[in-house]
Image: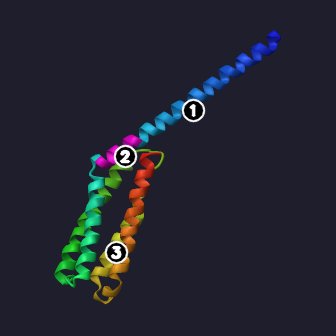
Amino acid sequence: MSSKKKKILFTLAIYLSIALITLTANLMIQSSKTQGYIQHFKEQNGEQILEELSDTYKLIMESYSNYKLDKEAKAKVTHQLNRLNKELRKVDKEINSRNVPHPINFSFIYQDMKLVNLALADSTKDGVITVIVLHAMEGLGDLKKEITYIQYR
């Protein structure tokens, strides 16, 4: 090979090495940020809040199926949902205050909680409570899948 070709190949190899090192470093930094983000979510008791929300939805379904979802039970569940909503908003604000590549979107969970509260507050909607709660439980399951996907991305 001529000296000119060797020089071009050597320069090309150096540029390729620099590009690979930069790409690898960028991926490692993003992975580290994502893991820190998920860890921060767990430290803020985000998983615990989601589990409590899931348990609350299960309690609503159980109470409804056993005909125990009276005004008193509805008021108790509504109070608990409002408390969980405030806690989840606090966690959301805390973890999404910094720049992350793949933030968790809680907006549909807030909407589902609002719909469940409205259904519980209106006695004419007693027939659709189960449908609304099942929809909310499905959304909660989707959020848990999204968190797992972000964590192992």
Q: Position of residue 74 (x, y in %)?
A: 22, 79
The secondary element bearing badge 1 is classed as helix
Q: Which residue is mark 3?
A: 133
Amino acid type at mark 1: Leu
The question of residue 41 being in magenta is answered with yes
Rendered image quadrant of residue 136: bottom left
Give above or below for 65 relative to 51.
Answer: below
Nearer to me, 100 or 42: 42
Q: Which residue is mark 2?
A: 38
- Residue 69 shown left or right of residue 33 in the figure: left
User: How would you rate the neighbour count of disc 2 (Cα within 10 Å): few for under 14, some for 14-19, many for 20 or more?
Assistant: many
Task: Single out the residue that lies furthest toward the right.
Answer: 2
Q: Looking at the picture, how far across and down is residue 111, in whole percent?
A: 39, 69
Magenta span: 35-42
Which residue carries the number 1 mark?
Answer: 23
Mark 3: amino acid: Val
